[in-house]
């Protein structure tokens, strides 16, 4: 179990709707420490979770998952599906506007989807099955498929990187391999250039022109009613500094409770903790482009060096917030299989050394990137580096800030020429529960996730997964994808972890269970 019953009861309190007059919160400024620093603003250009979270602040989506994971209309008012499931027609809600006051139109939607579809794994699959995407007037559009595509709503409402956020057409026409330079969005908050201060803070202001849905907010769906004047993301790297700032009232909220400060915060009467974000998975990413990880035997050796228990305990410390999981998918999800026969989560050094010998590994150092300014990730690479040494690798752990890691992971050069070999990242549980939403589970080469694995069998199986709606068949296909990915060492499963959100007791309320921390419905008293 991840959490105590006491914290579970807090969730109920957190999600209860409290009634305040407008005057009670109209001038509120909510100050929070996010999960990491925000350096990249384009949520289609990078899979960084902090950029995805930024996206949900200033953009809206056509569909979104509610608290139960059901996909619900968001910017879409209504839609119809033809009898053969090949023609989907959508109408936008009236009154939708961008931050500059211009109306959201079907042309904006088409341009936004086109750009997203060039970079997102599931988007690429949807576009491959698509015959056309056309506007039917200013507020309606139609998608026609060559054959039925069973994950239309899941694609348009996916919560994890990359999200099909709706941008103005002029912005969305930016080439997919180039970052956007506009902050004009469609969502409940606005961001001005003067309010973006990397390394210090980002100030999001309530969008007075935003038209929320009438339904109650649920997960990432429903009415995104903003109840504070502005939200400030304040970047504090040191866990003790974060803790002191919360206890002293200098900030109102920590998105991620530092594991090293958990006992201190748990017992502090001025602090309340909430379990609102589900568990996710830590993943080792290997660079398939350059030696030595261009050899599947070397990748398998690195995967077999993983000691999930040791790595998770070093990073998370407390048993209730970690869970070793031998499945590639999130344990407990519909496609999870811990008895896959290929990976146990426990180190197999002898087998790893044999694989390295068979591959002819020459002892050249492998570069493991460590994000020193991300407390939620920065212990895993150190432990993994030591485990890789025990497996026979020559390891060079290089410390850098998260923004530098995000930039460096785009490079396909050898590690000794500014490239990389390994890094560790984190994926939300909803993303890691399906082979078509788990972004690093790819065989799409240069068009796929960083590390750029090439595996035609995985991509073929994904297509089969999409084309069937039969759950039994999907489970079988998902298992075959998992086996293939583990055999070829596409990525390394490290296990699951979660954290609690910590807030000033009696000051912050209205937190919603969702795939990420969301700031609509949140009140500051």
Image (spheres, helix red, strand yellow):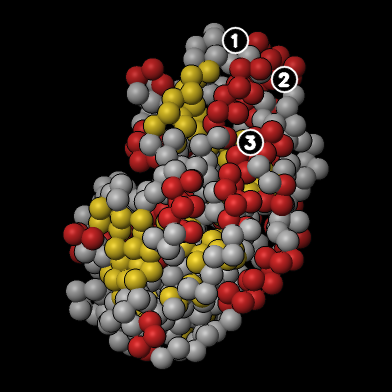
Q: Position of residue 360 (x, y in %)?
A: 59, 10
Residue found at x 34% / y 71%:
29
365 is higher (above) or lower (below) than 240 = above
Vertical side of 184 occupied by 371: above or below: above
Q: Name the residue beneath numbered marker 2.
A: 349
Q: Earlier in the sequence, mark 1 or mark 2?
A: 2
Q: Quadrant of residue 102?
A: bottom left
- Badge 1 vs badge 2, beta-carbon distance below 8 Å: no
**Residue 120 or residue 217, whichever sits in front:** 217
Mark 2: secondary structure: helix
1 or 2: mark nearer the eye: 2
Side of 366 where 467 appears, left or right: right
Q: Earlier in the sequence, mark 3 or mark 1?
A: 3
Answer with mark 3 or mark 2, whichever residue precedes in sequence.
3
Q: Is residue 167 visible?
A: no
Quadrant placement of the N terminus: bottom right
| Mark whose residue sits in front, 3 or 2 | 3
Q: What SS does tag 3 mark?
A: helix
Q: Nearer the viewer, mark 3 or mark 1?
A: 3
Indicate which disc residue 314 carries: 3
């Amino acid at each position: 179990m991840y959490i105590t019953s006491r914290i579970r009861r807090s969730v109920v309190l957190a999600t209860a709707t409290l009634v305040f007059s407008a005057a009670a919160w109209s001038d509120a400024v909510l100050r929070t420490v996010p999960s990491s620093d925000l350096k990249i603003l384009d949520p289609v250009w990078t899979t960084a979770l902090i950029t995805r979270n930024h996206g949900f602040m200033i953009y809206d989506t056509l569909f979104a998952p509610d608290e139960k994971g059901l996909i619900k209309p968001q910017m879409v008012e209504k839609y119809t599906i033809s009898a053969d499931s090949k023609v989907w027609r959508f109408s936008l809600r009236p009154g939708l506007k961008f931050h500059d006051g211009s109306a959201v139109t079907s042309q904006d939607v088409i341009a936004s989807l086109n750009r997203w579809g060039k970079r997102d794994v599931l988007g690429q699959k949807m576009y491959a099955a698509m015959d056309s995407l056309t506007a039917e007037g200013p507020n309606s559009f139609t998608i026609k498929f060559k054959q039925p595509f069973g994950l239309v709503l899941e694609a348009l409402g996916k919560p994890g990187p990359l999200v099909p956020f709706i941008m103005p057409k002029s912005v969305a026409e930016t080439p997919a391999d180039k970052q956007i330079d506009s902050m004009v969005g469609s969502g409940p908050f606005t961001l001005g250039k003067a309010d973006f201060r990397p390394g210090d803070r980002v100030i999001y202001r309530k969008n007075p022109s935003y038209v929320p849905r009438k339904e109650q907010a649920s997960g990432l769906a429903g009415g995104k009613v903003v109840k504070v004047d502005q939200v400030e993301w304040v970047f504090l790297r040191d866990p003790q500094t974060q803790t002191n700032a919360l206890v002293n009232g200098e900030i109102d909220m920590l998105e991620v409770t530092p594991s090293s400060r958990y006992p201190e915060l748990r017992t502090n009467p001025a602090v309340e903790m909430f379990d609102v974000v589900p568990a996710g998975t830590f993943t080792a990413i290997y660079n398939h482009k350059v030696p030595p990880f261009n050899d599947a035997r070397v990748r398998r050796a690195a995967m077999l060096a993983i000691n999930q228990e040791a790595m998770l305990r070093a990073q998370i410390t407390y048993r209730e917030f970690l869970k070793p999981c031998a499945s590639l998918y999130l344990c407990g999800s519909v496609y999870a299989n811990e008895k896959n026969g290929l990976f146990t989560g426990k180190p197999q050094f002898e087998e790893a050394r044999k694989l390295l010998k068979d591959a002819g590994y020459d002892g050249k150092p492998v570069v493991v990137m460590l994000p020193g300014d991300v407390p939620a990730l920065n212990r895993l690479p150190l432990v993994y580096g030591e485990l890789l040494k025990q497996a026979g690798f020559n390891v060079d752990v290089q410390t850098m800030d998260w923004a530098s890691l995000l930039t460096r992971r785009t490079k396909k050069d050898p590690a000794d020429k500014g490239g990389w070999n390994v890094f560790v990242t984190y994926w939300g549980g909803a993303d890691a529960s399906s082979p078509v939403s788990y972004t690093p589970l790819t065989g799409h080469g240069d068009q796929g996730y960083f590390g750029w694995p090439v595996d035609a069998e995985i991509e073929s199986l994904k297509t089969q997964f999409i084309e069937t709606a039969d759950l039994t068949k999907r489970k079988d296909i998902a298992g075959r994808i998992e086996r293939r990915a583990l055999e070829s060492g596409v990525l390394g499963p490290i296990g699951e972890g979660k954290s609690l959100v910590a807030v000033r007791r009696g000051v912050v309320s209205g937190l919603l269970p969702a795939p990420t921390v969301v700031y609509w419905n949140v009140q500051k008293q």
